Amino acid sequence: MKETIISVKHLVKIYKMGDLEVHALRGINLDVHKSNFVAIMGKSGSGKSTFMNIAGCLDVPTKGEYMLDNVDVGKLNKDQLAHLRNKKIGFVFQSFNLLARTSALENVELPLMYNSRISSKDMRDRAFKALESVGLADRFHHLPSQLSGGEQQRVAIARALVNDPVVILADEPTGNLDTRTSVEVMGIFQKLNTMGITVIIVTHEPDIASYANRNVTFRDGRIQKDIIVEKPRNAAAELLTMPVLTEEDTI
Amino acid sequence: MKLKNQLRAAMRSLGKNKMRTFLTMLGIIIGVASVIAMLAIGQGSKESIQKQIANLGTNLLTVYPSASMSGGVRMEAGSSQRLTMDDYKAVAERCPAVMYSTPVVRTSGQLIASGQNWRTSVWGVYPDYFSIRTLEVEKGAAFTLNDDRTANKVCVIGQTVNKYLFGEGQDPVGKMIRINKIPFQVIGLITAKGQNAWGQDQDDIVIAPFNTVQVRMLTVTYINSIMVSATSEKMIPEATDELTQVLKERHRLGPSEDPDFSIRSQADIASAATATSGILTALLASIASISLLVGGIGIMNIMLVSVTERTREIGIRMGVGARGRDVLLQFLIEALMISLIGGFLGAGLGIVASGVIASVMNWPVTITLQSIILSFIFSTAIGIFFGWYPARKASSLNPIDALRYE
């Protein structure tokens, strides 16, 4: 049995909108083990994004238990949650969420800034290594506005990686990308996964989910299906056979 | 986050909106500059008033006899003839808090010299008078106690008298003048003192030995007043007490009886004048600090806009592990930076403005280090005070709400 990274029990999230109560999660039980590559699927409104936000310690559940790397997240205060986000979680967003007018390298350095034990030189080295691992070492000084969507998402992945998290959470990471760049990004996730990093992505595209080795389907705030993908697709191999698009074609 | 990185981040985000940052800063610059300039004007006028008062004589105390009464009608103050030479001698001998002292007899006289004439007051005093009134003799010399003992007909004249009798800039030493037909030799010319605080010309005066005036001109036995200087400013009340005690005793008055003389001190006038200019300074500074306050509100306004505008950035920072206090510090440092740089530039502008005021308006202006330090403290406090609320607002955002903000 592999080490459990994420373990949730009876997770419930209720949003109150005036008098109306929206039950986003109605009791989720899920264990994610080390080196899993989980794709969470479901229609919009199924609660998958809510689950991700709670898993990423950006939001807190209404009820239920959440253990992250053997830490009971429910018992932590805001500062401790911030610490957890900084040290154990790398979050990748659909809309990249990079700081504008800030270079790729400095965007990647950002999580390290909130880790006061790292010297400026170490920060730079580690950020550079993270950019290297997503294949953007040569564009470190570019601003987000000078990068393509795929490149921006790779910077965001580098930022998620830089603090050596126990898990990378990606909420619709390919939602804003075309097919080829989506495969590229999935290739990076697969590569990171083979290096032993646990990855959880949320997607509504079955194509994208088929790169993961475990598919969990949400429906109306509950888990409907949880299957192991016997033979995940190999993004790196597929990329070799795909035609290379020019800039104009992308647009 | 390390302070160094915080400072760099603050610099960068202020730099992104240079025009906005500068305009916000301008409020503080103008506020600090006007506070410094106003304090400089206030301080300058205070010092010039104090200088004028010091000009009258240092630690000067004057004993006047009270008003005389004749048949129930009070005459003007100082009109009684109760002060005598013996009173003066007692004062001179028995008051340790008194440094210099002189009896004073005063009269007015018609002066005639070299075909000109002029009317002015003639003072009969001891040479101590020059020390009490801080008079300096520009040409020639003051008379001595020896001149007094022999009632020599010598005198020292002021610049105004010299101007009307001999002409401005002329050396009167050695010349003869007649005062009420009595010939006097001029032996000294006093350095110009100008007007005193209430517009009296202090150079329109003739000073002669006490005995000469009392015996040769007035032929009286009383004296008009006694002038003394206390050993120091602090000793003025002590000297006043000693004078009161000695004179009451000599005039056979009990401790509870009203004295038949009054003692006027320079300190009263000085403190009244200083208080007036202090009020003026406070008024000017408080008007100026209103502009500083308005500048502070400008900072708060722009920081609130900035927090709203950068909600997403705050979300991103919190998402990668910034704690509430990191975000709070970030925005507080930005506000502080605006107010501190503004304070620094404002101090420079204030110094320049004070200089311009001094040279263009010809006002006395003194910039004190305290006023600069004060406005620095003030602008820092404003940065923290007005930066706190927006920073607090930023730091209390929920990461997920901030990230979703459009």
Image: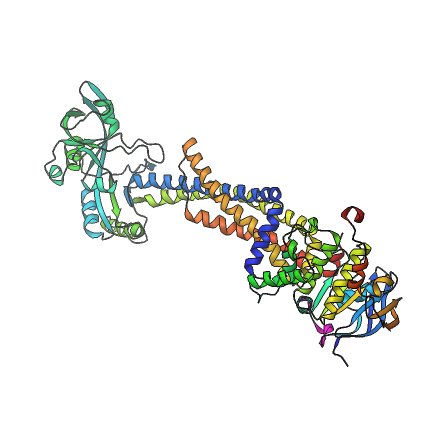
Looking at this view, name the residue that lies furthest to the bottom: A1
* Residues rendered magenta in the picture: A68-79
Q: In the image, what residue occupies the spot 57% across and 65% down? A: A118
In the shown orientation, is residue A94 left or right of residue B52? Answer: right
Answer above or below: position of A128 versus A9. Answer: above
**Residue B374 image position (x, y, % from top left):** 47, 50
Question: Which quarter of the rendering shows the N terminus of chain A?
Answer: bottom right
- Residue nearest the viewer, comparing B147 with B32: B32
Answer above or below: position of B203 versus B286. Answer: above
Rendering quarter of residue B193 = top left
Q: In the image, what residue occupies the spot 64% across and 53% down? A: A103
In the shown orientation, is residue B182 left or right of residue A90? Answer: left
Magenta span includes A209: no
Rendering quarter of residue A51 = bottom right
Looking at this view, name the residue that lies furthest to the front: A241
- Residue nearest the viewer, comparing B34 with B233: B34
**Residue B180 image position (x, y, % from top left):** 18, 25
In the shown orientation, is residue B188 left or right of residue B284? Answer: left
Residue B59 visible in this rendered orientation of the protein: yes
Answer above or below: position of B47 versus B200. Answer: below
In the shown orientation, is residue B266 left or right of residue B107? Answer: right
Magenta span includes A76: yes
**Residue B361 image position (x, y, % from top left):** 43, 31
**Residue B77 image position (x, y, % from top left):** 32, 38
Q: How many marks?
A: 0
- Residue nearest the viewer, comparing B117 with B393: B393
Rendering quarter of residue B76 = top left
Looking at this view, name the residue that lies furthest to the top: B115
The colour style of the image is rainbow
Residue B283 visible in this rendered orientation of the protein: no
- Residue nearest the viewer, comparing B349 with B196: B349
